[in-house]
Every structure is written in C-alpha cells, then in structure tokens.
Amino acid sequence: MATRTRKRKQVLKGPHGGMALVLAEDVTHLGKRGDLVEVKPGYGRNYLLPNGLATVPTAHNLRLLELYKQRIFQAHEAKLADLKVLAEQIQRVPHITIEALANEEGHLYGSVGAVEIAKSLKGKNLRVEADMVKLDGVIKECALYEIPLHLGYDIETKVKVMVVPLKTPEKK
C-alpha cells in the first residue's frame, strides 16, 4: 500500500528556530508595521496571529509588504519636499515681531517662549508647531534673537525674532 504524504501548511522558521511573521501593526518592543520578525511559536500562534497583529509571510503577503513600503517611501518623500518648501518660506521672512509687557530697561514682566514664537509664525501662514522651536530657555529681555527651528527629518532653519515692549495708550 502506497502511503500518501500530505503537505502541511507550515509557518516559515527563522534563523534561530522561531516563527517568522510579518507585522500588520506596530507592536511595542517587537517592531513596526511591515517588519519581518522572528518570535517564539507560542507568542505568534496564541497572541500575534489571533489578534491580527501579524500575518504569515507568504508570497502574496510579501508583495503587499513591498507595495506598502513603496507607499510609505512616497509619503516620506512628499513630506520631505513640503518641509523643504516651508524652510525656504521661513528663510524669506526677515523677522517676526512679538510684543510683550516690559519695563523701561527692556526686561519682560513675563517671558516669550516657543508657544508664542510658533503662534507668530502661524500668523504669517507658516505651519510651525511649538515643539519645532528649539529654545535654550525663555526670552526675558527685549532684543533681536535668532531662534533655530527643527522642522523634522533633519531639516533645520533659523528665524529672527524681535521682542519689543507692548505699546500701551498714554493715560491723560
């Protein structure tokens, strides 16, 4: 009697004998979406696969992974181009002026920080968030400052900020 051998669907093994999977979502302490990871068989079979966090690396899934990586790369390139345009627009601005309460010597009663600088830049239709402004501290005196901006993806620029005393109407 001839024995028939059945081909079982087996999950690919990694170089260390674990289960090789493609992550469908970001998993803390394991990897980001689209990464090919090797995990212990129980972790993959009992947690990652049933919860939809990973898939088996079949030829079809690997093709989908390549398409996903291409889309991510194109989105990254588009974001990089937008940030370069933003940096050029910021360079064209001679300076921004921020008014603050100050005494006669030019010392501010409060301070000017990253939030106020970002708000002034947004007033000029430049999309700069407060976390992009890299101040060493807060500004406490009226003067002209050159403030570095880190826009993301290693794109940096500088903006000149003029802090002037707030003009109050004279009392009669």
Image (spheres, rainbow, N blue to C red):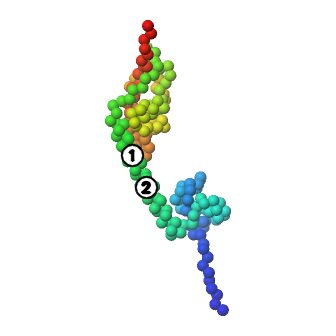
Residue at the spot 43% in from the left edge and 51% down from the top edge:
76
Where disc 1 sits, the SS reads helix
Q: Which residue was labeled with disc 1? A: 82
The residue singled out by tag 2 in the image is: 73
Which comes before the other along the chain, label 2 or label 1? Answer: 2
Split into 4 quadrants, where in the image is the C terminus? top left
- Point out the residue furthest to the bottom here: 1
Left or right: residue 66 compared with residue 49: left
- The image quadrant of residue 25 is bottom right
Where the N terminus falls, by quadrant? bottom right
Q: Are marks 2 and 1 in contact (CB under 8 Å)?
A: no
- The amino acid type of the residue labelled 1 equals Asp
What mark, if any, has residue 94 been given in the picture? none
The answer to whether residue 37 is visible is no
Give above or below for 143 relative to 61.
above
Q: Position of residue 56 (x, y in %)?
A: 57, 66
Extreme residue toward the top, this view: 172
- Dividing the picture into quarters, in which one does residue 144 lie? top left
Mark 2 residue element: helix
Residue 152, given in percent of the width and then of the height, sits at: 44, 43
Question: In the rendered picture of this protein, how many numbered marks are placed on residues?
Answer: 2
> Residue shown at 39%/26% (left/top)?
97
38 left or right of 93 in image: right
Res. 99 in view: yes
Q: Amino acid at mark 2?
A: Phe
Tell me the CA gap for discs 2 and 1.
14 Å
Identified at 47% across, 59% down, the residue is 68
- Mark 1 is surrounded, within 10 Å at the Cα level, by few (under 14), some (14 to 19) or many (20 or more) other residues, namely few
Nearer to us in this view, 89 or 108: 89
Question: What is the x, y in percent for residue 14?
Answer: 57, 66
Residue 65, image x, y percentages = 49, 62
Q: Badge 2: how crowded within 10 Å, few (<14), some, or many (20+)?
A: few
